[in-house]
Image (cartoon, rainbow, N blue to C red):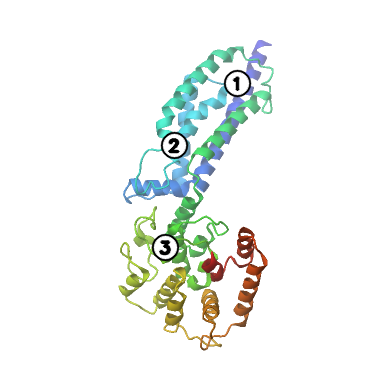
Amino acid sequence: MADITYNNRNNSTAAIRVACAIVFLIFTFCYLYFYQCDLLGAQQHVLSGGQTTYSRIIGAIIITGVLYLLHLGVFAITKLTKHAHALTYFPSFLALCILTSPSDNFDQHFSLSFWTWFAPLLLIVYVIIVYSSMQWQPYVSEKSGTGLFSGMSWVNMMIMAFMFMFVGIFSNGNDVLHYRLHMERCLKNKDYEGALKVGERSLATDSSLVMLRACALARTNMLAEHLFEYPLVGGSASLLPNGTSVRCVSHDPGDIYRPVGAIPKNKMTVEEYLKTIKITHQTRGAYRDYLLCSYLLDKKIDKFASELRNYYKVDSATVLPKHYREALTLYKHQHASKYEGFVDDVSEADYEDLLAMRKKYHNEQERQTRLRDAYGKTYWYYYLY
């Protein structure tokens, strides 16, 4: 009878250990492979000076394996089973958090994260808790540990869930940084459509993200058609990398930024940059749209209107890109005059509706919200707000 009871206890604790291992391995691999792969790749690029390339699948497998071996080492020392077995995974989760919690500007100033310095204190507290659990473990009743769905199992799963949340909360979860790193990977792989889908429903952005999106749009000849459908900041300066506020992180600029030719030097305006390149049949479209969109980003409507005829035939039979039609409609209303040859009844009607909507709502915040819902993907909304 004693042997049967002993075997049942072993089977019960073994089931808990297997369940915890499966949950840990699945979470860690998926977390590394799907969510933090771009961040890890960028860190490797920075630390190696661009000499090595991170493999998404191999990296996730190796890191998951190493962290699991760390757990096995802790388990071999502590022999924690029963209710406290999940605690043997804490050092692995802490290491995972440290690995995925660099500062947002780690590519410019790579330093150890806050958790690297705080980890020793956490480990001291952890050792005290583990030691107490080891002393308490022989006196724990076996009544709650009779199966995979027992109270003992639920306690371990709750501890694992708490550590999952610990990693999720305290690792780097900056949405804009993740968008940028993902887009850089897509651009490197020439997946321009994939790059444009990254964060497309989010209003969060920065100048570097604007530059990457403009580059993807230029590669698909859609810069003048869709640029103002995305959140934009920084004006025309956001179209070119400058090494500081507008930059690539996980790849060299030369691997990504070649919309119309050579890589621009730091602090060059779009006009200055375009003067340095040789226009070819392949680059003419990107050249003209970068120039014209730079005027629109800086709200230089008059300059845009005067330069437009140098690159497009403006007449009723010509279909201009969407944002150019919107800009010309706005120009006509500002100057209370016609723009010779330009006729767009649809844009005119839409702009009249926008003006009517502005007058309808007296509360500024409500007015902006309503206009964003209806016209947030137009040049008009960008110009106004």
SS for tag 3?
A: helix
Q: Seen in the image, is 2 located left or right of residue 136?
A: right
Q: Residue at x 61, y 60 (%)?
A: 364
* Mark toward the start of the polypeptide (1 vs 3): 1
Placement of the N terminus among the 4 image quadrants: top right
Q: Residue at x 59, y 82 (%)?
A: 344
Taking depth in this image into account, of 326 and 366 the one nearest to the observer is 366
Mark 2 near mark 1, Cβ–Cβ under 8 Å? Answer: no
Residue picked out by circle 2? 98
Nearest to viewer (mark 1 / mark 3):
3
Q: In whole angstroms, how far apart are the C-alphas of marks 2 and 1?
A: 28 Å
Residue picked out by circle 3? 238
* Mark toward the start of the polypeptide (2 vs 1): 1
Residue 125 position, x and y percent, is 48, 22
SS for tag 2?
A: helix
Q: Amino acid at mark 3?
A: Ser
Q: Amino acid at mark 2?
A: Ile
Mark 2 near mark 3, Cβ–Cβ under 8 Å? Answer: no
Is residue 54 among the parts visible in the rendering? no
Q: In whole angstroms, how far apart are the C-alphas of marks 1 and 3?
A: 57 Å
Residue 37 position, x and y percent, is 47, 47
Is residue 89 among the parts visible in the rendering? yes
Q: Residue furthest front?
A: 362
Residue picked out by circle 1? 82
10 Å neighbourhood of mark 3: few (<14), some, or many (≥20)? Answer: many
Residue 190 position, x and y percent, is 45, 63
